[in-house]
Amino acid sequence: MIEIRIDSKSCDLHEGYTLPDDILSFDGDSLATPAKGGAERRVRLSLPCSPHNETIFRNATDPCAGEEFNAEYHEGVVVVDGVVMLSGQALIEAVEVEERAASYAIVISDGADSWAAHLKEKPLSEVALDWGCTLGAGAITESWGEGATVRWLPVRHDDYREPYDSTSLFPPQRAMTVADYHPFVSVEALLRAIFEAEGYEVVSDFMQSDEFRRLYISGAYPRADRSLSRLMLSSGFLAGRQSSATTTANQLGRAWLTPLVLT
C-alpha cells in the first residue's frame, strides 16, 4: 500500500498509482564518498487535484489564490507498506492538465538541505560552543588574544558622576569591574559549531582569512532583552537589536543593508 503524506495529512492518489523507479534507487558510492553521501535526492510525484488535495495544497490550481504553498516549509513523506521510503521538503513544481483533469506535480527532496531546514529554527543560544572559563580579570585579558572563541570587551565608558571637589587632591575616578564587560562570540567558531553539530565540516578560504576571523557578534543571548536597554542608556551600546529586522529583495534578487537596519 502506497501512502503520500504532506504535513502528516494523507493525500488522494491516482487510481492504480505506482511510484517512480528512482525512489528505490541506491548509490553504493555514497557509502564510500562523503561528498556523494551528502548530496540531495529529489523525487517527482504526481497527485490528482481532488477536493481533499486542494485543501492540502491551498488551492494551488487557482491563480488568484491568496496563499502560496511553496512560500512555507512543508514536509512530505512517502510510505510503502508502513515503511518510510522518502522524507523531506515538499514543493509544487507544476500543475499539469491532461484531458480536462488536473494534477499536481510535486517534488520531495531530502539529504543535503534537511539539516539547514532544522537549524533555521534553532536559536543561537542553543549552539554548543567548546568554551568555558571562570570570569575574572585574567580570563578577560586572555580573551583579547588571537583566535579567542569568546572575547570580553568593555561596553561602558569611564564616567564621573560625583561632582568634582576642588579641595580634593585627586578627581573621582571609576574603576571598571567584571560587570562592565560584555561577551562577543567569534563568528567563525559559531559557524563551525553549527556545521559540526550536523556532521559537516566547512572548507572555505574566506573563513580562513584574517578579516573573517576578526568578526565577532554580541553573545549575551539569555539576558539580551534585559541588558540592552541598560547598556544603551549607560554608554550608547548598540551590539544588539531592539526589534526584528526584515528586508525585501528587489527585482534583481538583491537586499540592501543600511545603518538604519542595524538599529
Image (tube, rainbow, N blue to C red):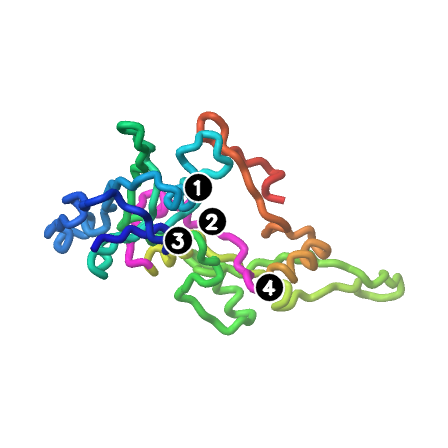
Q: Nearer the viewer, mark 1 or mark 3?
A: 1
Q: Nearer the viewer, mark 1 or mark 4?
A: 1
- Residue drawn at x 26%, y 40% is 46
Side of 188 where 152 appears, left or right: right
Name the N-terminal-most of marks 3 and 2. 3
User: Disc number at residue 223?
Assistant: 4
Q: Nearer the viewer, mark 2 or mark 1?
A: 1
C-alpha span from label 4 to label 3 = 22 Å
Is mark 4 in CB contact (under 8 Å) with mark 2? no
C-alpha span from label 1 to label 3 = 36 Å
Name the N-terminal-most of marks 4 and 3. 3
Q: Which residue is mark 2?
A: 215
Q: Which residue is mark 1?
A: 58
In the figure, 260 relative to 120: above or below? above
User: Disc number at residue 191?
Assistant: 3
Q: Position of residue 35 (x, y in %)?
A: 20, 48
Locate the N terminus and report the quarter of the image it occupies. bottom left
- Magenta-colored stretch includes residue 255: no
C-alpha span from label 3 to label 2 = 11 Å
- Residue drawn at x 32%, y 35% is 93
User: Disc number at residue 10?
Assistant: none
- Predominant secondary structure in magenta? loop
Name which residue type carries label 4: Arg
Quarter residue 105 falls in: top left
In the figure, 259 relative to 83: above or below? above
C-alpha span from label 4 to label 2 = 22 Å
Name which residue type carries label 3: Leu
Q: Residues within 10 Å of mark 3 (few under 14, many from 20)?
A: some
- Residue drawn at x 39%, y 48% is 74
**Residue placed furthest toward the right:** 167
